[in-house]
Image: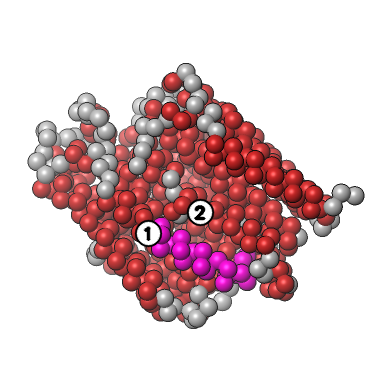
Amino acid sequence: MTGYTPLLPEGILIGVAALVILVGLFIEKKKILGYFTLIGLLASLGLTISSWNITTAYTGAPFYGAIVVDPFAQIFNMMFLFVGILVCIAALDAYGDHKNQDEFYALMLLAIVGMMTVALSKDLVALFIGFELASISTYAMAGFDKHDPKSIEAAMKYFLIGGLSSSLMVFGMSYLYGLTGSTNIDTIAAVFAENTALIGTPAILLAMVMLIAGFGFKMAFVPFHMWAPDTYEGAPSIVSSLLAAGSKKMGFAAAFRVFIIGLIAMKLDWYIAFVILAVVTMTVGNVLAVVQKSVKRMLAYSSVAHAGYIAIVFAIVAYPYASADATGLAVAGGILHAFSHAIGKAGAFIAVGAVTYMLMSKNAVDGDPNHIDNYDGLGRRAPLTALLMTIMLLSLAGIPPTFGFTSKWYLFLSAIKGGLLWLAVICVLNSALSVYYYAKVIMRMYWGEPKGDAFIEPPMYLFAMTIAVIALIALFFVPDGVYYWADAAAHALLGV
Amino acid sequence: MIPLTYYLLLAGALFTIGAYGIMTLSNGIRLLMCIELMLNSANMNLIAFSTHINDASGQVFALFSIALAAAEAAVGFAIILMIYRWRAEIDIENMNLLRW
C-alpha cells in the first residue's frame, strides 16, 4: 500500500459520519443509522487489523510525513475502534429511540477519528488537530443528556478543563517550535540530539512543563485529575466509557510520541516528573476510589489510578540504567495495559449504564442511580449483567484469568527488569489496595439483599459487555498476537 | 524591528492573565474569554517564532489553532446556553452537583 491508502480506516469513518449526519436530517427511524455506524466501525477495524504491520514512515509518507502509519499507531487505532464498537452497540439501547441519536453517532465517529489522528501523527500540528477534534466532539457528547443537570455540569467542567489543557499544550508546543524551528517530532528529536546546549535551558523546561500539564489533564494525572471523576460521573455512562477508554488513551498516545520520540534527549529532566506523577496518581486514585459511594465515581477514580500504572512506562524509558530490553518491554507492557484497561473500563462503564437503564425503566430510582445500594443483590436481579461486570472488575483489579492480569504482569515485570524494583513494589501494593473496592462491588452484587424484582436485561448492553468479556478472557489465554503487535509497536516507537 | 523577547514577554503576560482568570473567575463567558486569551497568546508565540526563524510552518500552526479555537468556542457557548436554560444564570460557582 502506498500514498494515502493506509489512511482508509480513518477515511471510512469520516465518510460514515458525514453520511449519518446528512441522512439523519431526512429520516424518522434513526436507529438504522446506528447499525450503519457499527458497520463502518467494523470495516475500519478489519482494515486496521489486516494492515497492522505496515510502516509508511520513510517511503510515501502521507501529508509530507505529518502522518505516519506504523504498528504503534495501528495498535492504538485498534484500541479506539474496539472501544467505539462497544460504545456504538450500547448506544443502540441507550439512545435507540432518542430523537437526536444520529448526532451521537456522528460525534462519536468524529471523536474516534480525532483519537486515531493523534496516534498517527508525527507532527505537532497534526497532533494538535487530532487532539482538538476528539476533545470538541466529546465535550458535546458529555452534555448529550441535555435535560439532566449532572450531564450539563459534567460537560461544562470537561469543557473548561479541556480548553485549559489544550491552551497549555499549544503554548508548550509553540516553545518547542521556537527552539527547534520545526513541528515535526523526528526533526525536533534530531535537533535536540545535535544541539545539546539546548538541554536544560529554562525555555525548554517551560515547554516541557506545559506539555506535561497539557497531556496530564487528558490522561488525568493527579494534580490535573479533578475534572475526571466529575465528568465521568455526570456524563452519560456510555460517553464516560468512551472518555475513560478512548480519550485517556489518546493522551497516552500523544505523550508517548512527544516525550519518548521528540524529547528523549531531555529524559533526565522528565524522568523525575513522571516518577512523581505516576506514584502520586496511582496512590491518590486508589485511596479516593475506596471511599466512593457511587459505583460510577469509583470507576472514575480507578481510571485515574490506572493512568498512574501506565505512567511508569515513562519512568522506565527515561531511567538511565534501564536496558534496551526493559524499555522495549515497558512500552509494550504500557500499550497492553492501556488496551486491557480500555476494554475493561469501557465494559464496566457500559455495565453501569445498563444498571441505570434497568433502574430507570422500572422507575425504581430514588436519588443517585449509580449509588452502591442499587447494586445490592444484582446477581439475582440481573444475573448476566452482574456476571459480566464481575469479570470486568476482576480484569481491572488484575486477577487471572483475565487480560488485566497479563498486561499488569508485563508492565510491572518491565519495572523490575529496568531496575526500578521499588516502583514495581509500589504498583503491586496499589493493585492490592484496588482489589478491595472492586471486591466490595462484587460482594454487594452477590451477597447483598435484593431490593426489588428481577430486571429485564437490555440486550444490546449485554451484547457489548459480552464482547468485552470474551476479549478479556480470550486475550488472557492467547496473548501472543496482541503481544507481538505491542512489541512491534514498542520497536516502532523506540526506533530500535 | 522589535526583538523576539518582547513578543514572548507579551504572550507570557497574556497567558498569565488568562490562567489567573481561569482560577479566579466564575462567570462562564469570562472563563471562555480567558481560555481564548491563553490560546491566542500561544498563537502569538508561534507567529513571533515563525518570523524570527523565517519558517512558515509556525504561521500555518497558528492558522489551524485559530480555526480550532473558534470551533471550541462554538461548543463552549452551546454548553453555556444549556446551563442558562437550566438555571437562568451562568455562574459556575453554583454548579456543585458533582463533588468528591
Q: Is residue A278 visible?
A: yes
Q: Within the image, what quadrant is residue A143 found in? A: top left
The earlier-in-sequence mark between 1 and 2 is: 2
Q: Which residues make up the magenta segment?
A: A262-281
Q: Quadrant of residue A367?
A: top left
Mark 2, residues whose alpha carbon is within 10 Å: few (<14), some, or many (≥20)?
many
Using a 10 Å C-alpha cutoff, classify the residue at mark 1 as few (fewer than 14 neighbours), some (14 to 19) or many (20 or more).
many
Q: Amino acid at mark 1?
A: Met
Residue A216 numbered tag: 2
Residue in front for this viewpoint, A260 or A305: A305
Residue drawn at (22%, 44%) of the image: A385
The amino acid sitting under disc 2 is Gly
| Residue that appears at 48% across and 69% down | A315
Q: Which mark is residue A396?
A: none
Left or right of A144 in this view: A186: right
The secondary structure making up most of the magenta span is helix
Q: How is the image coloured?
A: secondary structure
Residue nearest the viewer, comparing A15 with A227: A227
The quadrant of the picture occupied by the N terminus of chain A is: bottom right
Image coordinates of residue B20 in percent, x first then y, are: 59, 41
Question: Is B31 located above or below residue A293 in the figure?
Answer: above
- Alpha carbon distance from label 1 to label 2: 13 Å
Where's residue A314, x and y in %? 49, 67
In the drawing, what numbered circle is on residue A282? Answer: 1
Relative horizontal placement of residue A272, taking residue B10 as reference (left or right): left
Foreground pick, A12 / A343: A343
